[in-house]
Amino acid sequence: MAVNLTAGAIAMLSSGDAVAADVKPVLQVADVKLVNTQSISNKRYRILLSDGVHLHQGMLATKKNDLVRSQRLQKRSIV
């Protein structure tokens, strides 16, 4: 199934020209990495998102860690 990413959405959102609630961008997870933290119980994941043109990295909220552990959010996932 081919998916059309929202090309340019990252630049548009980063510049403040639009907000995610208005745009509803379709992005792809380019990478998910476990970040070394002091706390073993509070694992953190860094995600790299792509709109097909630009990349943007961010930290996944710890409440969403289950998405990574259950593999519902992984490299090449569409969000």
Image (cartoon, rainbow, N blue to C red):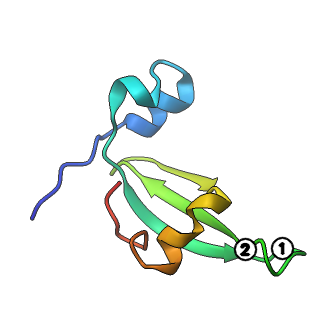
User: In the visual, does 12 lie left or right of 48?
Assistant: left
| Residue reaching furthest to the top | 17
- Could you tell me which secondary element the residue under label 2 belongs to? loop
User: In the visual, does 42 lie left or right of 70?
Assistant: right
User: In the visual, does 78 lie left or right of 41?
Assistant: left
Q: Return the residue at label 2.
A: 43
| Residue reaching furthest to the left | 1
| Picture residue at 48% right of the left edge, 69% below the top | 67
Q: Position of residue 34 (x, y in %)?
A: 66, 76
The disc placed on residue 58 is none
Marks 2 and 1: CB-CB under 8 Å?
A: yes
- Could you tell me which secondary element the residue under label 1 belongs to? loop
Q: CA distance from mark 2 to mark 1?
A: 7 Å
Q: How many marks?
A: 2
| Picture residue at 39% right of the left edge, 72% below the top | 72
Q: Nearer the viewer, residue 7 or 2?
A: 2
Q: Position of residue 74 (x, y in %)?
A: 43, 73
User: In the visual, does 78 lie left or right of 44?
Assistant: left
Q: Position of residue 61 (x, y in %)?
A: 64, 55
Q: Return the residue at label 1.
A: 37
